[in-house]
Amino acid sequence: ISYEASSVTLGVKRHYPSFLRTIPSDKHQVQTMVLLLQSFGWVWISVVGSDGDYGQLGVQALEEQATQQGICVAFKDIIPFSARPGDERMQGIMHHLARARTTVVVVFSSRQLARVFFESVVLANLTAKVWIASEDWAISRHISNVPGIQGIGTVLGVAIQQRLVPGLKEFEEAYVQADKGAPGPCSRTSECSSNQLCRECRAFTAEQMPTLGAFSMSSAYNAYRAVYAVAHGLHQLLGCASGACSRDRVYPWQLLEQIRKVNFLLHKDTVRFNDNGDPLSGYDIIAWDWSGPKWNFRVIGSSMWPPVHLDINKTKIRWHGKDNQVPKSVCSSDCLEGHQRVISGFYHCCFECVPCEAGSFLNKSDLHSCQPCGKEEWAPVGSETCFPRTVVFLTWHETISWVLLAANTLLLLLVTGTAGLFAWHLDTPVVKSAGGRLCFFMLGSLAGGSCGLYGFFGEPTLPTCLLRQSLLALGFAIFLSCLTIRSFQLVFIFKFSAKVPTFYRAWVQNHGPGLFVVISSMAQLLICLTWLAVWTPLPTREYQVFPELVVLDCTEANSPGFMLAFAYNGLLSVSAFACSYLGKDLPENYNEAKCVTFSLLLNFVSWIAFFTTASVYQGKYLPAVNVLAALSSLSGGFSGYFLPKCYVILCRPDLNSTEHFQASIQEYTRRCGST
């Protein structure tokens, strides 16, 4: 049973089946060191070990576990047995330690080579570092007595838990006062806790008495535990529970089995072994302290298992820096929120900070890659979280909606009022010259297109998407068809009826104007039905236009059906303009070229402006632009064709007479005859 051998290899039962120990395994020491590094955020370290199994295996295990926990070992080396303070080998280690730029150095070494190492550290003037000590030298005065070691920085370490053997100090002090080989201060006849004669032991004097430091007392206590473990094993094996032993012959393998099973309290300390023969005792976490007149150490925490966990009081540590601040040991400082780490070089601890792109965020579980936000979420550049997108559409209660709704409603009222006015004056020359009953068809088509505009307000639904543009396209197509045939008919009557009377009679007898309007309107109706069937306008959620918004709209604006319907209306507009232009020299009461030109020009300008806007803007107010363009077209058609006639009916009744119209025709006839 070893009281000081901590190598992990000795715990392999296949190789060392009868080995037990009262000192913790280096496996737990390495785990404790890694937790200590993590607790202070030290991820950029150097590791130095001593030659031999203790240091080499410790460095290897520490590097493996530290790397698994995200800690980078920038530099590691081994102190050879032949090393001397300041020799070429040690100077090389000091040079590499300085170049590594690590604030924290773990020294996993035996105390003999640790002294050589720190004497070299003092010679190289390596200061302002944090030194992590392994248990073999953490509380050893052999190291703390190195001249000049006070200036190297802060020393933290892992030490065997401090326990004292009762009576040991008094026992040794007794030998200072006694003759060689004599018992202690007790008389031979008195009962004494240490009454054995030790004639082969060294007799101590006051000058020869070694200092009973904490390190040696820990080793003594571990030996004390080992002896008691053997005693308890023998006690159980020999059956001595009743005061007398029941067995007189035992075998070594039987004793080994009993020692493995021991479980008892020794001065409030539980003594037992796990399956590897290791004790379940923990470590003390210590910090060196030079604040007093001489070196000391203070216990700042402890490490227990299973599982390995730390309990540290960080306020007890006196750091070497200004204002007692915890030193940092990182290759690269932490990135700002929303910045991902892009590794630069060989070590993952060395990185550059790159902000996450818009629409992505940095999840704290993976600091090296930005994650895309969900479809319904957004994030600005350099964000650590995603935000819900705001759903927007042209609502009924916005100011621009009120203005457009008021204008559209006013247009509907004017159209309705004009229909009533024309019905009241149906037999007057003005109404007859405007087309008579055909005017009601034209006014109805304008009203139908105007009603479709209400579908542009509020959240888009399937019915509103299906009807709003198709009603507008069909209604305006009917109006343009009527306007075209009306302009054509006036030109034909005044200019060509006398030249081709047969065609004119056939045109009138076969209801040519009505057939044209029906056929032209049916063509647009067929286009709209094909549009709705093949390229069905559906409510859509637009995510690409604005990163923080979801724009609700219909899918009609970019469909071939939509473009075909409006191209057809454009063709009708050109036809109406051509026919009205041909009649620019007709009698004044029949000459509508100026008004029709104004209406069609406003129509062209409105839709050109809309399509130009739609090519560069796809936001919530695009439906408002669409409504404005449609209102301009409908209002232009209504005002250009019907308002002059309403003005004559209401304000100039003298012009609304048969005599005035006949005089106008006669004037046109005389003008044509003179030419």
Image (cartoon, rainbow, N blue to C red):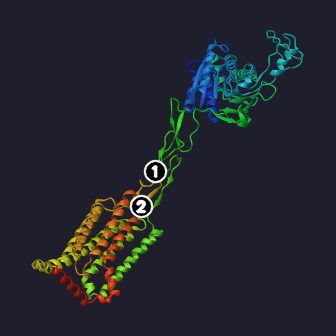
Q: Nearer the viewer, residue 30 or 42?
A: 42
**Quick check: 28 left or right of 555?**
right
Q: Disc number at residue 552?
A: 2
How far across and how far down the image is residue 234, in percent?
70, 21
Is label 2 in a helix, a strand or a loop? strand
The numbered mark at residue 374 is 1
Q: Is residue 494 above or below residue 395?
A: below
User: Measured from the top left, where is residue 285 in percent x and y?
Assistant: 70, 30
Q: Is 467 in front, or is 451? A: 451
Give the mark toward the camera: 1 or 2.
2
Nearer to the camera, 430 or 225: 430
Q: Is residue 274 above or below residue 388?
A: above
Graded by Cα atoms within 10 Å as few (under 14), some (14 to 19) or many (20 or more), the crowding at tag 1 reads some
Q: Which numbered circle lies on residue 620?
A: none
Mark 2 and mark 1 in contact (Cβ < 8 Å)? no
| Quarter residue 230 falls in | top right
Callout 2: few (<14), some (14-19), or many (20+) C-alpha neighbours within 10 Å? many
Residue furthest left in the image = 502
Identify residue type, mark 1.
Gly
- Where on the picture, by quarter, is residue 545? bottom left
Q: CA distance from mark 1 to mark 2?
A: 18 Å
Percent coordinates x, y for residue 387 in the rendering: 51, 53
Q: Where does residue 440 sit, x and y in percent of width and height?
A: 28, 81
Amino acid type, mark 2 = Leu
Q: Residue at x 31, y 62 (%)?
A: 536
